[in-house]
Image (cartoon, grey):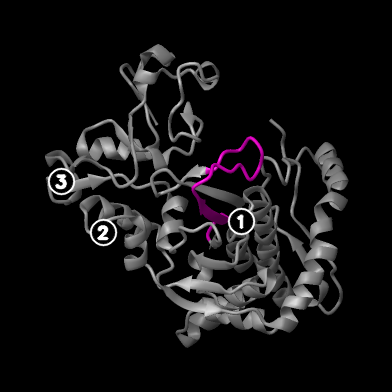
Amino acid sequence: MVIRKSLSKCHSEQTDKYVMLSGYLNYRLCHRFVDSAGSQVGYLPFDYKRLKWAGSHDWKWQALAIRRQSLPELVAPGTRMGEISAAAAAATGITAGMPLFAAAADKACEVIGAGCMLPHIGCLSYGTTATINTTSAKYVEVTPFIPPYPSAIPGFYSTEVQIFRGYWMVNWFKEQFGHPEQFQAQEQGVVTEDLFDDLVNSVPPGSMGLMLQPYWSPGIKVPSPEAKGAVIGFGDVHTRAHLYRAILEGLAYALREGKEKIEKRSGVAITELRISGGGSQSDAAMQLTADIFGLPASRPHVYETSGLGAAIDAAVGLGLYPDFPAAIKGMTRIGKTFYPIAENQKTYDALYRKVYQKMYTRLQPLYLEIQKITGYPRME
């Protein structure tokens, strides 16, 4: 978000403030240019290791046409930033004078809202972008040169691996192949997602060898920008039910791969999982995740944990809890836990190690040829 002194000029010297969307909203709410260090997740001169604006000699100031005085004041999550102004109260209906506290980015809030503040707990988000995160007191670059995000806990980091598009693929399937379940749900007055769970459960673990690589959107490092999605192993026994289950399994395989990268870089074994986001409402998705990871997978008592994480920051800021461990313990709890089924786990482990982990390297040369021939995905 760029706030200019003059709308007629676009030069950097005419720009008064550079802020993230969170900083702009803070300004509109309390009329101060202030933002949380936990919300700095973009391309700004930010020191991700020290969780503050970069030092004066940092190369980022030369790479980006931004001056220090153009950036907002940064505060730690849980810090009071100001209070709701009269103008904001009139525009929103929020009570004037209500304190405004710093929280963090959506995923960072989701992690603590799911109760994940220890590095051995993996937080999976089954949303539009599927992710696995851990909270760490150590600065750990899971992918070299790509920093961890700031945590919603001051002084901590969120080690994240993303699967772009993630559970968007579920919506894609529903739009392209899920019309029978949608019509049936309307006729019977039931939730569509329950019928999709029936679709998953009609197929055995491993989808009878149908394997999906969920690189539906080019990545930054791994997969590399030329990567594409792939489905292999088709046979005449396969139906759309097999494809749907293969989508869920492919996402879980990719996140397991992310888990192993986090473990390798951090030196800490992940021994339990918390899963939030819309996709976590599927019992079938929860069970196959537990089976693929070989770990207990727990659903928090609310699946929209990002809002809860922001509330935890506010609760600590207000002094309702003495610290973050107490607030997370008092405000989060597990709803239901799914345990690995030994036979399923054995099947998934073999498919993951002997097939899934080899798919990208085997297919990468073909992705490059596809890119050269068709021009997609476009390389900037």
Using the numbered discs, state the Cα–Cα distance from disc 1 to disc 2 in whole angstroms: 28 Å
x, y percentage for residue 147?
A: 57, 38
Front residue of this view, candidates 316 and 212: 316
Q: Residue at x 65, y 55 (%)?
A: 263
Disc 2: CA contacts within 10 A as few (<14), some (14-19) or many (>=20) = some
Dominant SS of magenta comes to: loop
Residue 268 numbered tag: 1
Front residue of this view, candidates 59 and 139: 139
Residue 164 numbered tag: none
The quarter of the displayed image where residue 348 is located: bottom right
Instruction: Check disc 2 and give the amino acid type.
Output: Tyr
Write down the residue under mark 2: 321
Instruction: Check disc 1 and give the amino acid type.
Output: Val
Using the numbered discs, state the Cα–Cα distance from disc 3 to disc 2 in whole angstroms: 27 Å
Confirm whether the magenta stretch covers residue 39: no
Q: Secondary structure at mark 2?
A: loop
Q: Residue at x 49, y 66 (%)?
A: 278
x, y percentage for residue 312?
A: 32, 57
Q: Is residue 244 left or right of residue 92?
A: right
Q: Is residue 27 above or below residue 152?
A: above
Give the residues in magenta: 127-148
Write down the residue under mark 3: 89
Confirm whether the magenta stretch covers residue 133: yes
Number of marks present in the image shown: 3
Q: Secondary structure at mark 1?
A: loop
Please state which of the two labelled residues, at mark 3 or mark 2, is closer to the viewer: 2
Q: Is residue 8 above or below residue 376?
A: above
Q: Is residue 239 visible?
A: no
Please tell me which of labels 3 and 2 falls first in the chain.
3
- Farthest bottom residue? 188
Instruction: Check disc 3 and give the amino acid type.
Output: Ala
